[in-house]
Image (tube, coloured by chain):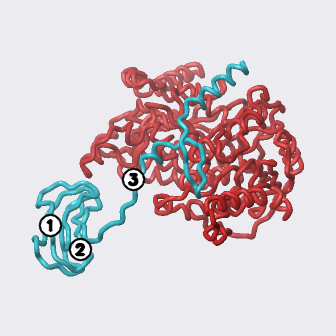
Amino acid sequence: MEDLEQKSKSEDTDDLIYQDFNIDNVIYRTTIPKRNQDKKPYTPKDPKEIYVFIPGTILSIHVKKKEKVKKGDKLVTFQAMKMNNVILSPVNGVIENVFVKEGDNVNKSQIVLKIK
Amino acid sequence: MSVKQKTIDLRKRMQEALQGGGSKAIEKQKATGKLTARERIIALLDSNSFFEYDLFVEHSGKDFDMDKKYLPGDGVLTGTGTISGHPVCIYAQDFTVAGGSLGYMHAKKITKIMDHAMKLKVPIIGINDSGGARIQEGVNSLAGYGEIFYRNTQASGVIPQISVILGPCAGGAVYSPALTDFVFVVDKISKMFITGPEVIKTVLGEEISMEELGGARVQAELTGNAHFFAESEEECFEQIKKLVSFIPWNNTKKAEAFPKKSPKTKSYKIDSIFPTNPQLPYDVRSIIRAISDDSDFLEIHERWAANIVIGFARLNGQSVGFVANQPLVLAGVLDVDSSDKAARFIRYCNAFNIPLVTLVDLPGYLPGIDQEHAGVIRHGAKVLYAYSEATVPKLTVILRKAYGGGYIAMCSNHLRADFVFAWPTAEIAVMGPEGAANIIFKNEIINAENPEEMRKKKIAEYKKKFANPYVAAAYGYVDAVIDPSETRHFLIHALDISKDKQETRPYKKHGIPPF
């Protein structure tokens, strides 16, 4: 009985895929769960790229390409969670491109427009 | 009517109520691989120990023609019984009756048995299998949930609260299990979520199945909402019976002592399990088994945040809670989830008078932008808080690495461990030798003729001087450096002499842990 346990135990650990894992310049042999392997590299957000923060439907676009905008100007109204959400311009600039049109369904983190 | 006739009438009424949602609904329940509510209670409790109450409770809905409907027991069974001879209060929602939906009287049955549990100071076990609020009863069903949540909170840390998810548990209903001590789930049967796939689809346009959104595996592996995962209901009930053997019946008692048993040292030999090179992995659970009675270890949260191991075992018959870094996974680092997992368990053990045994072997906190942005400061602080707050006997064994913040966090002398033991393989240092040498000897390394060689030399020098338990032992931060084979011996003695440990904390309404 005990021998059996010993066997299955070592089999369990033999099946594992060991990898190198660097912490403070020391390499450790260990297993790395899928979640930690699938990590996307960090990219800083560009405040001039406007994304929707929640999936919804674009109700109206208040600006056009090449139009000048000031910080705080209304850019887009979109409906999500039964609310009309308004995205305001975070910067002064000129609209470089608009990627959506009224009535479009947008997903979370989809880009809607870009400011120069 | 004679007593006999009255009794026959009673039997008839009982028969009617006992059929629950009727044979068709029961057939449907069985077809999905589920037991009925009554079968579940009977399977979990000692045989012939279940006494049912409020069988004749009727629902109080008046609107939408509900007044014309009869719902046996209003969709929930409540009662008392025993597990291994110890009393428990229990309820089980009956999905065959109106989908186990929660109306006012259904909730009232649950809160009544919860109140009993609190008065009798016995555990409360809730078996959840419900479609959610009974919409026809409107705000009264919300009131019902609120009353349950309030009681869950009052009972928290006073009596053990166990939630068993054996069906859907959706919407507000999930907050009752979330407030309880242990949540059990069964593969393909348990489903927990706040907003279901339908709502997510209509509101957000995202499609996902119930199983992928909040099935047993998701809750046990990804979210950490579930503490125990089973393949079948039968296995789940065995897990519950095992768990309750390790915990006391309420917060004024200690866990029941069992006859002492030796570890299975043939299967679990520290010498062959444990590599002295701190960069090599091993399964710390084998070390726990090597020192515990009968090598019996009940792991909690086995599938979630596996870089830390928590669970119950016995030393000389006495229940202890183990907290151990797991070098097998992510080198045993502390991160957001593992900190959260350990901290809650430490607080559980402290609330229920279960001594804590901490096994330390970690390189520190997990470095990374994602960890920092996920709030590793706030979550990591929970471990410090929980250990510092705990007044149960706290025993620590440093096996290998104990570097930096990780050393402090893992129940160090400074957080008031009662006894800190260290194996001769322990490396207690402000950081790993490589990192430390690079900082301390920076100039010597840069100015050397051969910097790489100098770096290696300085690392070796630092290792020799500091990568050991003796510097900490010289300051009294380690109470004893011990032969690994004597670990069980030292721990059992420390537990024995800590039996009547008393430690007070300053008066407060409650602390403000970094929730």
- The quarter of the image holding the C terminus of chain B is bottom right
Looking at this view, is B180 or A41 the one in front? Answer: A41
Marks 3, 1 in one chain: yes
Q: Earlier in the sequence, mark 1 or mark 2?
A: 2
Q: Which mark is residue A88?
A: 2
- Count of residue discs: 3
**Amino acid bearing label 1:** Asn
**Hue of chain B?**
red
Q: Residue at x 81, y 61 (%)?
A: B471
Looking at this view, is B473 or B177 the one in front? Answer: B473
**Amino acid bearing label 3:** Lys
Helix or strand or loop: what does disc 3 sit on? loop
Q: Position of residue B497 (x, y in %)?
A: 89, 50
| For the residues bearing labels 3 and 2, Cβ distance under 8 angstroms | no
Q: Residue at x 14, y 65 (%)?
A: A98
Q: Which mark is residue A97?
A: 1
- State which chain disc 2 sits on: A
Q: Position of residue B184 (x, y in %)?
A: 54, 38
Helix or strand or loop: what does disc 2 sit on? strand
Looking at this view, is B69 or B252 the one in front? Answer: B252
Q: Position of residue B99 (x, y in %)?
A: 38, 35
Q: Is residue B508 above or below residue B453?
A: below
Asked if residue B54 shows in the view, the reply is no
Disc 3 crowd, CA 10 A, few/some/many (<14, 14-19, 20+): few
- State which chain disc 3 sits on: A
Q: Which mark is residue A40?
A: 3
